[in-house]
Image: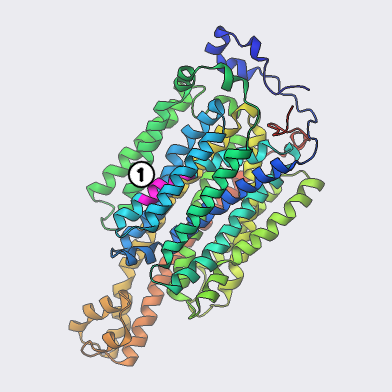
Amino acid sequence: MASTYPDEKKINNAQKREYSDDLERTQTVYDDNFHGLSLKTILVYLALCIAYFVQLFDIVCSGAYARTIAAAVGTSTDSAVWISQVIVIVTATLGPPASQAADYWGRKWFFVGSSVFGFVGAIVLARAHSIGQVIAGQTISSVFFISQPILIAVGSEILPRKWRPIAQGGLNAAGGLGGVVAFLGGQSLIDQSPSGWRNIWYIITALMGASGIIIATLYWPPPMPLQKTLSASEKFRRLDWVAYFLLAAGLALLCMGLSWAESPYPWSNAHVVACIVVGGMLILALVVHQTFFQKHGLLDHDLFKKDRNFAIAIGCFFLDGMIFWAYNSYFPFEMSTLYAYNSSAIEGARNCMNFFATFFAVALIPVISHFTKSIREPTVISFLAYVVFFALMAKMDVNETGKTWGYPIIMGLGLGWSLTYLVAAAQLSAPAHLIAITSGILLSIRSLGASIALGIYNAIFNSELNSKLGSNIAAAVLPLGLPPQSLEAFIGALASEASESDIAAIPGVTPQIIGAGVAALQKAFLNSFKWVYVAAAVISAVAAIASCFLINPVKDLNNHVDAPLDED
């Protein structure tokens, strides 16, 4: 059988020193080496789906219930953003080195090791009694997310290349199921007990352990030639340590500066300006370093040689991260603030509508792959779906609760296709020996987009709310007779969601004034959500335009398996 790697015996010391050129000349023969699915392959793929389920379950719960957790441990909800923020920071900073190392040492133990960190961190978070402990636990647990690019690579490698969109679609479906369980099961656990959120992370602990055990016992792929022939010191030297530092430091400073903007510091404050400027300079230095000084580092230039798909996928993944976190952080927030139901079950069902649509979209992928072998068209459609969703949400009125059930379906159709086809496009564009770092770069760039977006959206929302809340309420209630000296107390009571009896106890307050004040409060919140959605719609439109330039890799969707588990 033809090999995708050069003969190990021919890799001498001189060739090792010029390993990148040797790999560049690797003859990749896509022969038909698929002999049907074995039980081992099925179980390994199932473990990957469990891991992806857990990761989306964790991400959604961290975003949707962050304010609940912050309140439960007795801290301001302003700190809640860091519960989800640490996930994207850790993924973006540790994902690339782990992925690059996995191309030298193999995938298995990076996945298993990250599962151990996730297991321990989830226990710490579940038992936390302060916001510091919560964030510390989530930081440790977030190490599990460095396995995301590895599991995406493995899911593609153990199955035929013609099934690559289907393989990625299955993983996304598992993630969608994690989102459904997060909204329905997670809310149910929280409603049952004030400490119900702790049980969420106990469940995460169990599932992380299960997936790690299956991978540890059943996943034994054939090693790559360089994995066996290079010494440990040679492998360490080829890791791009400069890029890792620039990425980690730049991303951390950018996220900190953007998170502080308008909460609690104004944009002009030195804390915000210094973090954003220094962080931006470090990211710019990373781009210069990878472009001119490091040909085969984090962004290996071989990734861009075949066609333009990898470069386009990177850009679209960055934008997709910005898009998803607009939905993940602000849609549940808006629903609970302006369109809440008395039943948590109904709330959870509404939040799951996009994931139900994701399942439908994923179910269409085998049909699309079989008849068209197209990647460009579904990707464009997915981003156009995002544009429509955010445009419709930006035009929402407080009294249009029914529309909040239909609009998420449009979002879900996009979620089902965007990641699936972008991953497939990038992996098929990259050399087979760089598939792990390919997946790592994609997810890291998506996390970078998410990190930046969270800060931007938070700044937009807080800026709009702070500028409109007081003036809206004052304009609504002062003409109705509220004494000016009671205005500050009235606004504070409404903003803090005080009980109606406490608000009524404020001097000069009447039921009519309360009604007008609540309406003005809702209008201020609605306007703040609107501009977040407008920003997300513009970003989605840019991604849709960029994805129009993808190339459909028809010839690459063949019957070859890159890393068969049952190879003799």
Q: On screen, 503 above or below 565?
A: below
Q: Nearer the viewer, residue 396 or 111?
A: 111
Badge 1 element: helix
Q: On screen, 557 above or below 223?
A: below
- Would you say residue 539 is visible in this rendering? no
Q: Position of residue 45 (x, y in %)?
A: 66, 45
Residue at the spot 35% in from the left edge and 52% down from the top edge = 135
Q: Which residues are magenta?
A: 137-144
Using residue 147 as the reference point, say whether residue 43 is left or right of it.
right
Name of the residue lying farthest toward the left: 485
Using residue 334 as the reference point, say whether residue 431 is left or right of it.
right
Neighbor class of circle 1 (other Cα within 10 Å; few <14, some 14-19, many 20+) is: many
Is residue 139 part of the magenta span, yes or no? yes
- Would you say residue 298 is visible in this rendering? yes
Q: Position of residue 420 (x, y in %)?
A: 64, 47
In the rendered image, which quarter contains the N terminus? top right
Q: For residue 70, what is the image quadrant?
A: bottom left
Three-letter amino acid code of the residue under disc 1: Leu
Is residue 439 part of the magenta span, yes or no? no
Residue at the spot 45% in from the left edge and 18% down from the top edge = 233
Residue at the spot 25% in from the left edge and 90% down from the top edge = 481
Figure label count: 1
In the rendered image, which quarter contains the C terminus? top right
Residue at the spot 33% in from the left edge and 66% down from the top edge = 71
Q: Nearer the viewer, residue 337 or 8?
A: 8
Using residue 285 as the reference point, say whether residue 416 is left or right of it.
right
What colouring method underlies this structural image?
rainbow
Q: Position of residue 392 (x, y in %)?
A: 56, 67
Q: Which residue is mark 1?
A: 254
